Amino acid sequence: MTRYVLIAFLLIVGLFSPAAQGELLSVQISGGTEKIDSFVEKDVLYFSMSQLAELFGDRVTWEEIGLSIAYQSAASKTLFFIDSPFLRMGDSVRNMVYPVIIRNGELYLPAETFMPVLNRIRPEKVSWDAHRKTIRVDSEWYNVTDLAFSPKANGLLIEIFVSGIKDYEIFQSEGNWLNITIPNGTVNRRQLLSRRDKEFLLDMNVLQNSGSAQVSLRLRRKIDKMTHRLQTDPDRIQISLIDSLVTPITTSEMKKVGPDDLIDRIIIDPGHGGSDYGAIGHNGTREKEVVLDIAKRLAKIIRKDKVFSAVLTREKDEHLSLAERTRIANEEKGDIFISIHANASVKRSARGFQVFFLAPAKNDSARAVAQLENATFLAELGSQPDSQYDDLSHILSDMIQTEFQAESADLAAMIERDFRRKVNSTENRGIDQAGFYVLNGVYMPSVLVETAFITNRADEQLLNSKDFREEVALAIYEGLKRFKAKYENK
């Protein structure tokens, strides 16, 4: 009991004692510079991990009745012990030399000795410049960045996404292992391992060696025939595993994505409109206005480049019903449907862009986004009580069209990759799936793009920026061109 009293006393002292003379540290992240609090204690520079976690979109929480604090990122959990230099990462314990300090209710850590640890926790490269008192978060440090599997009618396509790589080696080994060695490769190991797919793999290893990276895939199906090559736009190693027992499909029999076998008509759907304002930001920014501007910019780019034609479901501030949006898309014989939105969350620190395709949601976060975007259509359909909402959800889940689900997922991946390359001023929340009503009635590959969080102060400021809106439109356009190049029969 005495120990808890002592801890409580130390916390009170930490909260109310005069703070040491502090200064602001710079954090270079997402193409910009942010500031966080710091101070010097016994010649050791401490920084606010609580504030840095917010920049990452992560959280710091109290645990064990005030005896420890946890930093929870998307991939891991790290536990700090008050007034102790030790921390726990999974099953391992590390010593930062200098103790954790709690000040004004925030977690402060020693910059010099904790940065190497943070570099292991985060998927980006995190470095500390003591001279400039700057934390640098560099997501472009890796040149082996991602992995994707695409099942085909006659086999499997594996793509390893790289940047500036000119050569690679590939060989098979006992146990049905496929090994890809990339000279001068620096691999984002956590990202690649997150793509592990049990449908295709028995096991997977990603190794960072001195002077090279190696990706090893133990495949479920025996490797029969294989071709591979380097591809550009985007840079990637493309490996085709061909099942020779499957009867080849002739070009004339291939599934058509567009109604005329061409992908040349894009339906752009700016979310909300008229009496439906959508989400509203802290400074009064309205989702309906932001997404209409982005949609018009995308249409302008498309019409100028003349690779596609563009149709907007609305070109002014007007309300459109669910039926009207889907009718326009189908009657105009669209080849791709893009619904543009701005996300919202009760968690003010939540920020970033995300791309969704239509499929039953697999997590609470995706369900929350779908519920937010479906709210107007739900009212339109006259379902108010929870029981009716649940019934409607089940019905719509059963009705979800699967004809273009694989193509929609692929389109979402392509747009997300171009967001990563072109939009670095906010976070990347990746790709997800959920039951969006607006996507359900259109008979073409379709995605919903959440451009940024209008409820986050930094993202709201971006959404009010003409440059950011143009970047978003360009990123979507590049993804559309990539999809056309892959799927259009020539």
Image (cartoon, helix red, strand yellow):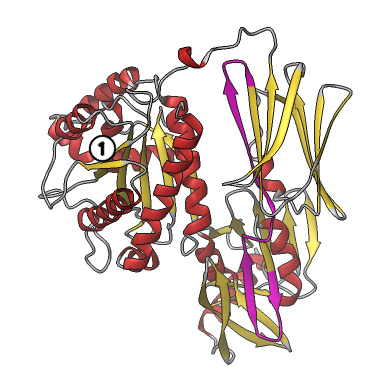
Instruction: Give the extent of the magenta segment.
Output: 127-155
The stretch drawn in magenta includes residue 133 = yes
Query: Residue 277: percent from the left, percent from the top?
Result: 17, 53
Q: Is residue 301 left or right of residue 362?
A: left
Task: Please name the predominant secondary structure of the magenta segment in the image.
Answer: strand
Q: Nearer the viewer, residue 441 or 46?
A: 441
Q: Is residue 253 above or below residue 278?
A: above
Whether residue 363 is visible to the viewer of this picture, yes or no, is no
Q: Residue at coordinates 14% horizontally, 36% vertically from top-left?
A: 321
Q: Is residue 256 left or right of residue 465?
A: right
The stretch drawn in magenta includes residue 136 = yes
Q: Quadrant of residue 263?
A: top left
Q: Residue at coordinates 57% horizontally, 50% vertically from top-left?
A: 74
Query: Residue 457: percent from the left, percent from the top?
Result: 36, 67
Give the residue at mark 1.
374
Q: Is residue 31 above or below residue 417?
A: below
Q: Quadrant of residue 325?
A: top left
Q: Residue at coordinates 74% horizontally, 23% vertically from top-left?
A: 226
Query: Residue 283: percent from the left, percent from the top?
Result: 25, 69
